[in-house]
Amino acid sequence: MKIAIAGAGAMGCCYGHMLKQAGNDVVLLDNWQEHIDTINANGLKVTEVGTPKVTQIKAYRPEEYDQAVDLIVIFTKSLMLDGLMQQIKHLIHEDTKVLCLLNGLGHVDTISKYVSKEQIFMGVTVLTAKFNAVDVPGDVSFSSYGKTEIENIVNSRAAAQAAKQIAQTINDSGLPCEVVENIQWATWRKACLNGAMNSLCTILDANMYQLGTIDNCRNLIQEIVKEFALIAKIEGVHLDVEQITDFIMSFTNDGYSGSRHYPSMHQDLIKNNRLTEIDFLNGYIARKGKEFNVSTPFNNLITLLVHGKEKITHAR
């Protein structure tokens, strides 16, 4: 399969590495020129669950690549999605499939401005990845083969068959992937995970294991999840607060291989001084709470704190 990874950050690079190793024709699309040049000159360095590897894979700026692809996997940051879709719209033809694996909520509305919903597939992944050093291009790592769940958003035989093919391609690369019947629920569950884990680890400058050691960690996470559940219910998705809190807490367990991982928001703001995806996570809940006249004090405060940190550090 010919695949373009749109957004070659740590997650995109690790996904591209695995898909390329499995024999797919893969390219990386990104706007970081030094990253592109390093990958093209030296290959992509990937530490795959402790094993250093180098993958020979081509990287381009989105507007410079013009070959037809079967699948585009979107891994950019949520706040950059619309701009990226503008850059890659020339690659999207009637047979191109677009798989979105972004954190956050509300992305179908943005993507569907550029491509038919029949061609859009939404997914969530719990793979954890990072750059091995701040501002050092072409060198990433991931600590576990996190599961990916995907679904076609249009209920048709062709879309369902395409979802199965995409999932099989990902599975064949060594990354577990499953087609599910309610990606909205999975997306909201992942948003709860990110809304609790990413934001709290960023505010506290902690990894996931360290977060789990603080007093009343579970209670704090549960209050955040309760507010997500209130908004999800209004939007037609039922979330079991206890079940999802258990799910989130499992990432803080010492026995979980990725528990020492610093979430992507922490990497963005604390390590790389970049703007975060807070407005597509806790900020989304805060906005919807105001719109629906639902009290969301925990998510309101978290959103203000993260934006405050962005301002103090002059994040860009």
Image (cartoon, rainbow, N blue to C red):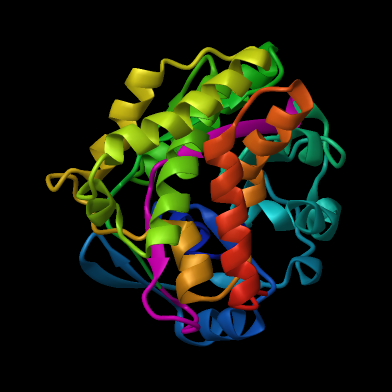
**Residue 294: percent from the left, percent from the top?**
66, 23
Instruction: Name above or below for residue 104 compared with residue 86.
Output: above
Whole-percent x, y for residue 140 in the image: 40, 70
Q: Residue at x 45, y 67 (%)?
A: 267
The image quadrant where one finds the C terminus is bottom right
Query: What is the tally of numbered marks visible in this picture?
Result: 0
Residue 72 counted in the magenta span: no
Residue 150, x across and y down, in percent: 52, 29
Is residue 137 in the magenta section? yes
Rendered image quadrant of residue 139: bottom left
Q: In this picture, which residue range is highlighted in magenta? A: 118-139
* Vertical side of 149 occupied by 37: above or below: below
Residue shown at 13% from the left, 48% from the top: 254
Q: Position of residue 163 (x, y in %)?
A: 57, 26
Q: Nearer the viewer, residue 278 or 123?
A: 278
Nearer to us in this view, 177 or 76? 76
Question: Do we see residue 164 in this rendering?
Answer: no
Nearer to the camera, 240 or 222 = 222
Q: Is residue 53 above or below residue 109?
A: below
Question: Quick check: can you spot residue 262?
Answer: yes
Q: Residue at x 53, y 27 (%)?
A: 227
Extreme residue in the left direction: 255
Q: Which sits in the foreground, 114 or 132?
A: 132
In the image, taking residue 269 as reference, residue 279 lies left or right, namely: right
Is residue 143 found left or right of 231 in the rendered image? left
Q: Relative to 102, does residue 79 appear above or below in the rendering?
A: below
